[in-house]
Amino acid sequence: MRYEAEPRDHSGASVKQDPHFLQDVVFHGKFELLKTLTPEENTHSQHGLYFQDGQRHVDYVLTYPLKKTSVGRSIRYTTHLLTENAVARSLRRNHQQSTNTSTLSNVELNSLGETFSAHEDHKTFRREEFQGKLRDMGLELEIAEDTQILGAGFVKIHAPWNVLCREAEFMKLKMPTKRVYEVKKSSGVIEKINQLINKVLEPIHPHVEDSQPKNIKHLSHTFSREKVHLFDLSDKDSFFDSKTRSSIVYEILKRIICKAKYSMGITSLLGSGVYTAAYPLHDGDIDDESAEPNDRKLLFEEWANYSVFYKYQPIGLVRKYFGEKIGLYFAWLGLYTQMLIPASLVGVIVFLYGCATVNDNIPSMEICHQKNNITMCPLCDKVCSYWMLNSACGTARASHLFDNPATVFFSIFMALWAAMFMEHWKRRQMRLNYEWDLTGFEDEEESLKDSPRAEYEFQVMQKSLRKDHETQYKIEKLTCRDRLPAYMTNIVTMLLMIGVTFAIVFGVILYRISTKAALHMSSNPTTRNHVQLTVKTTAAIINLVVILILDEVYGVVARWLTVLEVPKTDKNFEERLIFKTFILKFVNAFTPIIYIAFFRGRLVGRPGNYLYVFKSYRMEECTHGGCLMELCIQLSITMLGKQLIQNNLFEIGIPKLKKFIRYIQSKQGSFQEEMQKQLKTQYTDHFLEPFSGLTPEYMEMIIQFGFVTLFVASFPLAPLFALLNNIIEIRLDAKKFVTELRRPVAARAKDIGIWYNILRGVAKVAVIINAFVISFTSDFIPRMVYQYMYSPDGTMHGFVNHTLSYFNVSHFQDGKEPLVPMQLGYAVEICRYKDYREPPWSTTPYEISKEFWTVLAIRLGFVIIFQNVVMMMNDLVDWLIPDIPKDISLQIHKEKILLVDLFMKEERVKINLESSASGVNKHNRNTNTTSQLYLDS
């Protein structure tokens, strides 16, 4: 192990000593230091949360790779004193001394060129330069190296109080003041109702103790060192919590600029391999019973545990530990899951209504009637023969479960549900902004958000260096001309990926056509009787596998395209990445479903004049029950498959697999378990999976939201399956964040960003798509048209016969007629097919009939009316429900008044102090004057 603080004499010069002497100094120094530590400090040190002195908290950790070296070099480089004295730290801040140190480091690196390559030497130089800059910024470092255990070095960083205060003022952090006020409660009746509800819901609330009562709140204000007396500094150690401390250190790491290869911040150093990882530490080990209670352990017990799936989430504690951005994600996910409960209940009721009325459905009864002798035309050329309509009885009855009048009501309900969900989230978001002191955050933090990314600054610097000899002005930004190749690459690649999705869907279409023909030629009667179900199910599974594979590919492609654009800020980078990923994954997930819903069965032609692909593959047509049943099969398999395989198994399995691989790779050679436990936290965190952002988490939920809303008219059980998945998903994500991932850097945010706009867009598109599904995919409109315009008795009797056209089998094209025309036991002269066309004996045989145009006109009219009525209802909901709850608006106004009173009081105290001071000075001057006159006299 090594703990770096290079030994120097009183003048600050580097001391050259015998390696064995240095080794003795380290061992004896470490022994003496550990003897002076209290048992609590020693425990802190062993767990890796503190420096070796057991007092300074580790706020951030940087890791870098180590190579096995010779004994002499190992002693020279890995033996240092355990602590740094004040003289050495002050000398480091001196620019001249830093220059001397860099020179000595370069000389020493050059002398060891035989052991290390020039590339590794340069990384070491850049690392030392960066760490020197960190010390100049006031951060305290402690370096621990252990080549036997991990082959990695750890730079532990601690931010002292003065640095925290300085950076908090620069970052404009809102911190609690001494002023405490009582949150206004509701009126008497409403307050009693709320108390009763809270008492009933007490068992499902997490057992998380609050540091202060819920009706008491600290008045917060932007931190300022000049007004430090206003803030609650009763406990300096907890004034800046671990989340805030790590975010402050991260801001410093991002803006450090080094001269070596124009390294800008920790991001560029991680990208070039100077450091391998950078992360804050978790608060202790959740499995250690002897460890002190901490927020991580509490989160594991009350949140990241499947046994508490029925409880509310401790959102306040999640925000305290992970930051506002992650807290908002879980708050949004929790609210979305709660809102799925009423949607699931209504969906189940609609499904049960279909089950209850299936025996009373006249069209399906007509199809299933045994005396129904309607002979249908072949479903494919040659190998398919004529078939009886009553053989489609099962499909017709199953279709009624999802294609009944209640689905129209459910579509309207889900459109209003989406609007209610969006409004409810806006109100919940504002309440969290108030509770988390994020009001006014956007105005104060806009300048910090717009800080350029390290990659962008590097590109600008490279461009400046190239143009330095040609131009005399400084280049400060990348122009559209610089980005034009990247933009063109983005457009071409996106179109190519979408084209790949279309090509795969087309390939599945060919698979269905060819497989259907092959199964019809089977000698097994069971196989021939289940051709439709076999083809639909296998095609849906193939689509699912392709979707899962392309999802991973498209995620990588979207990130590569975004990096290619070199966005200026982190916010721009995230928004562009989200947009590209959403477009690609949305197209990938919904293209097969859109084809079945709106295109299959529309472009088939008619018997005797079918439409062919490549002159040999006849286009698919829907069964008599319609394509809605197949749409339901495709939707259910895709949705359930993505949730079970991609969202759950991948999220559990892949992080564990990566963690195991890193652990195996680190076990190079033999080591002792006792040595691994010396710095337990930093080692175990090193094995954890790096946090890669919230984009994958949001993306899977947005796609699920699309399944729930876009085609809900064809699958009323979608909200129920989404609810069951999300109950597991919340605890799965929680466990992943607490146990499987390194602790993310806390990021402040007042909303969910671009995801809200995507949700609104999906909700609006859902209204249009459901209108088309009801109108064109289901038989709702044809049934209404027949019942009120063509039915002789105003009922649905005769509807099936009304929708079937006639075809004379002698009009088949040569070579397309069935090979076994007598399969039904009799010669067929006229067969029926589903379409609105004139019979062969009319003056215009096989032409589209007037009934077709009537139904089409009413279908289009229904789409327009449905869309506008639902949109107006959504706007009405948006107008009726205010975005900011009334009580929160009053509390925000009250906070502003209290803040003004606090500053006015401070100003009055300041004036009084100045007046008192001036009065004392005046009295002293008068006394001195009297004394002088007495002496003169």
Image: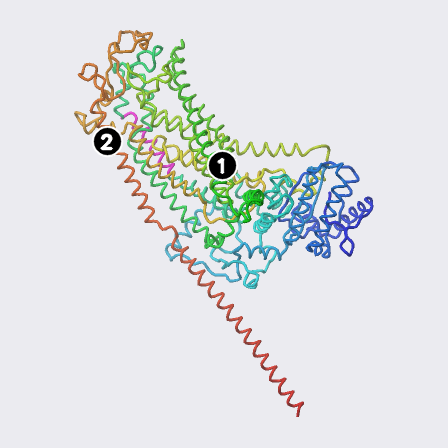
Eyeballing the image, is 430 above or below 850? Answer: below
Give the colouring mode of the picture.
Answer: rainbow
Give the SS element for disc 1.
helix
Badges 2 and 1: C-beta atoms under 8 Å apart? no
Give the SS element for disc 2.
helix
Mark yes or no: residue 258 visible.
yes
Residue tagged by mark 2? Answer: 858
Badge 1 crowding class, 10 Å Cα cut-off, few under 14, some 14 to 19, many 20 or more, is: some
- Which portion, as a residue range, is magenta? 343-360
Residue tagged by mark 1? Answer: 486
Image position, residue 147 (x, y; %): 72, 38
Image position, residue 672 (x, y; %): 73, 36
Mark yes or no: residue 306 visible.
no
Q: Residue at x 57, y 43 (%)?
A: 458
Left or right side of 135 for 333: left
Q: Please say whether residue 536 is one of the residues in the magenta stretch.
A: no
- Between marks 2 and 1, how big is the CA–CA gap? 47 Å
Left or right side of 551 for 776: left
The one of 725 and 822 positioned closer to us in this rendering = 822
Q: Residue at x 40, y 10 (%)?
A: 522
Q: Quadrant of residue 381?
A: top left
Image position, residue 117 (x, y; %): 71, 36
The one of 8 and 830 positioned closer to us in this rendering = 8
What's under tag 1, amino acid-wise? Ala
The one of 524 and 842 positioned closer to us in this rendering = 842
What's under tag 2, amino acid-wise? Ile
